Amino acid sequence: MLNAIVGSKGAERVLLYLQNYGEGYARSIAETYGMSPSEVQKQLRKFEDGGYLVCQSVGKTRVYSWKPGNPLVKDLRRFLQTSLDYLPESEKQSYYRQRRRPRRAGKPM
């Protein structure tokens, strides 16, 4: 859907993942979509070099998030959110509704 605008399906997936989850790292994004980690890293570096993302090291992992000082990020995120809202429900369930933290101990299923 967005690959015509952002240049590739990989770039589209990386941006939608970051919009949905707020931050991410290459391996998690790659596993979500069945992509190679090197392809995801390439896209993340491209967006970081372009000034849309920032990276911080957490242990040995490089975690990427939106760059707060870039004035274009707000509009880009609004555009991406609209794109997420119009995805088919099956695709939302597959990629964008994954549990990100452990279930509380003792919580009933």
Image (cartoon, rainbow, N blue to C red):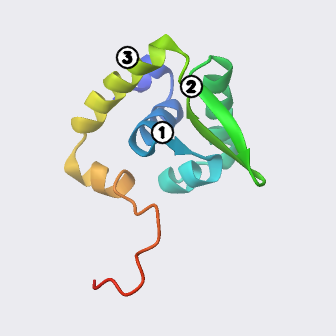
Mark sitting earlier along the chain (1/2): 1
- For marks 1 and 3, give the CA distance: 14 Å
Q: Secondary structure at mark 3?
A: helix
Task: Residue at 37% x, 17% y: name it.
Answer: 75
- Where residue 74 sits: x, y (%)? 40, 20
Q: Mark 2: which amino acid?
A: Lys
State left or right for residue 90 relative to residue 52.
left
State left or right for residue 44 relative to residue 2.
right
- Look at the numbered discs 1 and 3 and tell me whether their residues touch, using CB distance below 8 Å: no
Q: Residue furthest top?
A: 71
Q: Secondary structure at mark 1?
A: helix
* 68 lies above or below 95: above
Q: Which residue does the numbered mark 1 point to in the structure image?
A: 18
Q: Mark 1: which amino acid?
A: Leu
State left or right for residue 92 relative to residue 5.
left
Q: Which residue does the numbered mark 3 point to in the structure image?
A: 75
State the quadrant of the N terminus.
top left
- Where residue 84 sits: x, y (%)? 30, 37
Mark sitting earlier along the chain (1/3): 1
Task: Residue at 41% x, 75% y: name it.
Answer: 103
Residue 39 quadrant? top right
Mark sitting earlier along the chain (3/2): 2
Instruction: Sort mark 2 into few (<14), some (14-19) or many (20+) by Cα contacts within 10 Å.
Output: some
Question: What label sits on residue 51 in the rendered view?
Answer: none
Task: Residue at 42% x, 83% y: name it.
Answer: 105
- For marks 1 and 2, give the CA distance: 12 Å
Q: Which residue does the numbered mark 2 point to in the structure image?
A: 67
- Where residue 12 sits: x, y (%)? 45, 32
Instruction: Sort mark 1 into few (<14), some (14-19) or many (20+) by Cα contacts within 10 Å.
Output: some
